[in-house]
Image: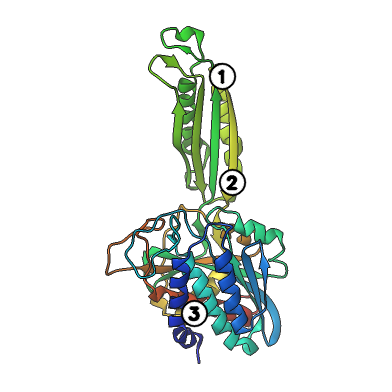
Amino acid sequence: MSIKETAKEYKDYVIELRREFHMYPEKSLEEVRTQKRVMEELAKMEIPFESVADTGVVATIVGGKAGKTIALRADMDALDLQEIADVPYRSKNDGFMHGCGHDGHTASLLGAAKVIKQIQSDLQGTVKLFFQPAEEVARGAKKMIAEGVLDGVDAIFGIHVWNDLECGKVSVEAGPRMASAGIFTIDVKGKGGHGAMPHQTIDALVVGSSIVLDLQAIVSREINPSDPAVITVGKFESGSRNNVIAEDAEIIGTTRCYNHEVNNQFEDRIRRVCEHTAFAHGATATLKYETLVIPVINDKKISKIAAGAVEKIRSKEAIENFPALNVGEDFSYFMDQVPGVLALVGCKKESEEHYPHHHPMFDIDEDSLEVATALYAQVAYDFLAEGGEA
């Protein structure tokens, strides 16, 4: 029996699990119930596993023949979001919701575990299953890596259901797929005073406004136009009333790009602009910068294997070239260590109104779970069968 046919047998199992996970969403780094259920299901399958990164799980399926090792990853955490959809599997945890599809990822990887276990003796190598916590706060992948989960791993494959993509379609193309994400806070210090006597002050609001404008020149004049990049100021707070000149200002924003070199230069460039602009006005500016995630860049060889897997479980026509996304994913940290691919699996519900990820009405077409289950298993089998070579 093919992987495609075996995955179909477990479709109801995966849907049932997904709905259970959806009803009990858990905050990042607090995925206690989810972890427990994952371990219970793995134990039933007689697949060895261990707890990692506090609330994560790594399971291992050793094939009947020696070979390379591939890791399959699913994230497990939910969002701080109140679900308003009227569905039977609506969240029972007030204020939390699986509004991004991680419930489907976890369920699909457990389904893939069943499929892979069934063909274990035919595997030419080892498959590791990563059930990762805390993707939404960009801490889970780094925490797992620090505990050595990638030791001995030759490649990694992950899936993200995507509701801007038609159900049944899959995007696995090589190159940049998701952006880096950085956050910054700039604290401006001037000298406050009376609005009628500006010559006695250093207006932090004016200084902050200049900084906001000057930051735009980084993208327009310092970064190659062929490398898409974004510096967005999302919050600018200063002042207290009409006749008081502000002593302080706070500027908060985010950065995005698809290029590691550009990403590595964001902090220094923003610091130079804010400090020098403030100095020109006689004020000071202090930058706090944090890189949440680095760019997701699909490996060319693994991408070719993944495309072949899509053809086997669906068809050549199911392969969709989809634009790179400006959202971030901490799967990128795994890919920074070993070659890998993050696939987008279409989950758009055509018969209903379309709601984006992170919306309180978000839901998926559950037919996508059968595709995800089969794709996890097929990519793992094909990578090992080819010795990791495309």
Q: Secondary structure at mark 2?
A: strand
Mark 3 sits on what residue? 374
Residue 182, position as x, y percentages in the image: 55, 45
Mark 2 sits on what residue? 291
Q: Is residue 389 left or right of residue 177?
A: right
Q: Type of residue at label 2? A: Thr
Q: Type of residue at label 1? A: Ala
Q: Secondary structure at mark 3?
A: helix
Mark 1 sits on what residue? 283
Residue at horizontal 46 percent and vertical 30 percent from the top: 212
Residue at horizontal 27 percent and vertical 69 percent from the top: 351
Q: Secondary structure at mark 1?
A: loop
Can you say whether 123 is above or below 81 in the image? below
Q: Please identify the quadrant where the C terminus is shown.
A: bottom right
Residue 276, position as x, y percentages in the image: 58, 24
Say whether disc 1 or disc 2 marks the residue closer to the N-terminus. Answer: 1
